[in-house]
Amino acid sequence: MSQDERIGKATFTRRDALKFAGAAGVMAALPWSGLPEADAAAPVLKGPQAGGFYRFTIGEIEAIVISDGGLSFQPIQPTWAPEASKEELDGILRSAFLPTDRLTLEVNTLLLKIGGELVLVDTGAGGLFGPTLGKQRERLSAAGVQPGQVTAVVITHAHGDHFGGLLDSAGKPVFPNASYFASKTEVDYWTGPDPDMSKLRLPEENKKVFAANAKRYLGAIKDRLTPVSAGQKILPGMEVLSAPGHTPGHIALLVSSGKEALLNSADTVHHHVLMFAHPEWTSAFDSDPTMGAKTRRKLLDRAATDGLRVLGYHLPFPGIGHVRTAKGGGFKWIPEPWNWTS
Ligand SMILES: [Zn+2]
């Protein structure tokens, strides 16, 4: 082996490149050929992710998934899948090429234009969950939408990562012209005197914060809040589906126009691998884990049987795809490729 061969790529010089290209003309086409050999000021590539939004349609309905950001949980257990043995959990994560020490969830809020209404489904975390979340407002703006133009906001359930964007840092409503919708069961539960949080597997301190935030945020919009129930249409083409368990009044939404439909599953299924493979695996954030698992299986079954297009709030951005049944009684998430022409 020659000295040059041993050195290899690490010392591949401009002279070597010329030799390789065989002609100065070819060299001129190389992107770095005009740069000094050393000391080119390379930009810093590390930093926060940019994230963004994704436009699509449901029949006549124009839609945008607005990413609020993402959040990692470390360690995974006991917050997620406490029922799983460590070996089985690690095995499933490894088989999906995912790290075994953390679980990353995204936050996909949805904006719909139905007739003359601009409807937002969930508002992200606002300032409640730290710097990797709370991006909805700036991304709405990047998509050309100002908060004052939003005419309706649907809150699928009263957890901070869904309602945190309702209020700004001064406690003022971010969407001043909107009407608000949430399930009657959910509103009654959180605004009642003593919400039963006995099945939540969280420290008592966290439960208190959950309850206090829900009361505060729901309280701030109560004058313009319409409680809704399963089967009700919030707007033409937007039907409320009961999906209890994650919270008592957790709802999903079936959005349809013409022959097309989208099932906004909200927090029925939090992770694109774990809870599809094992719908019986739950989360410490579930108000009633057993009921949550039952709801998850029912909704995933329906999505798989009917071939429904699904949006998952916490699935990898933009969180749109389909569900199919899998060996062993579970399901598989099939993400939809981006459509660059819509
Ligand atoms: Zn959530």
Image (tube, rainbow, N blue to C red):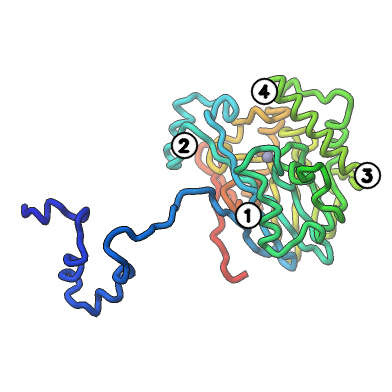
Q: Identify which amino acid the numbered label 2 is placed on.
A: Leu
| Mark 3 residue element | helix
Mark 2 or 1, closer to the camera: 2
Question: In the image, residue 53 lies at what x, y percent?
Answer: 63, 58
In 3D space, how far apart are the residues under numbered discs 2 and 3 (Cα atoms)?
A: 45 Å
Task: Specify few, some or many for label 3: CA neighbours under 10 Å numbering under 14, 14-19, or 20 or more.
Answer: few
Q: Identify which amino acid the numbered label 4 is placed on.
A: Arg
Tell me if residue 160 comes above or below residue 260 in the rendering: above
Res. 22 image quadrant: bottom left
In 3D space, how far apart are the residues under numbered discs 1 and 3 (Cα atoms)?
A: 39 Å
* Residue drawn where x is 87% and y is 43% of the image: 221
Which residue matches tag 1?
307
Earlier-in-chain disc, 2 versus 4: 2
Mark 2 or 3, closer to the camera: 3
Q: Which mark is residue 223?
A: 3
| Mark 2 residue element | helix
